[in-house]
Image (cartoon, grey):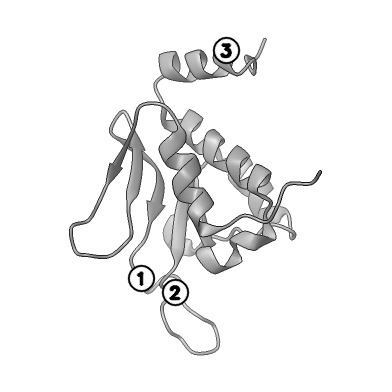
Amino acid sequence: MASRKARLADVHEIASGMPHVTKWERGDGTDRPVYQVGGKSFVFFRTPRPDAVDPLTGEKYDDVIMIWVESESEKLALLSDDTNPFFTTPHFDGHPSVLVRARDLGALTKQELTEVIQDAWLSRASPRRARTWLEAHRLDTP
């Protein structure tokens, strides 16, 4: 059976379900948390910023999620696949992350979103934590 379409709630469930995760809230009443492992962010709900705007109206997107990636090549791979909803802006040139709008998450399956968030966690976790998680999930690399 194919995985269902991803939803915003899945981002929270997957990110908070990884080990050693802390959820940092802004304290301004908005639901824009930052998920961290070892004090390093791996999923970040952005506030509206001038670098991510609707090309027709010029309005700032209010639902952008930043997800860390392992490397520039991983970022380029995600961005070059037209079936993915990921994007970037010049502000993030050289930054190991991709952006996605919450409203576009349904272009991914829950399984695809899970893999991207797990990879984000792995890219920010300590080598020991990453190795332990990979071994526990039998994903250890040679």
- Packing grade of label 1 (10 A; few <14, some 14-19, many >=20) is few
Q: CA distance from mark 1 to mark 3?
A: 39 Å
Q: Label 1, secondary structure: give it.
A: loop
Asked if disc 2 and disc 3 are in contact, CB closer than 8 Å, the reply is no
Q: Is residue 96 visible?
A: no
Q: Amino acid at mark 1?
A: Arg
Three-letter amino acid code at the position of disc 2: Tyr
Density class for disc 3 (Cα within 10 Å; few <14, some 14-19, many ≥20) is few
Q: Is residue 102 left or right of residue 35?
A: right
Residue at position x 49%, y 54% from top?
9
Distance between the alpha carbons at the discs numbered 1 and 2 = 7 Å
Please identify the quadrant where the N terminus is shown.
Answer: top right
User: What SS does tag 2 mark?
Assistant: loop
Whether pointer 1 and pointer 3 mark residues with C-beta atoms closer than 8 Å, the reply is no
SS under mark 3: helix
Q: Residue at x 51, y 19 (%)?
A: 133
Please identify the residue farthest to the top as the structure is shown.
142
* Sequence-first disc among 1 and 2: 1
Residue bearing the label numbered 1: 49
Q: Earlier in the sequence, mark 2 or mark 3?
A: 2
Task: Examine the rendered structure and indicate whether residue 66 appears above or below residue 68.
Answer: below
**Is there CB contact under 8 Å for labels 1 and 2?**
no
The residue that label 2 is drawn on is: 61
Mark nearest the camera among 2 and 3 is: 3
Q: Which residue is mark 3?
A: 135
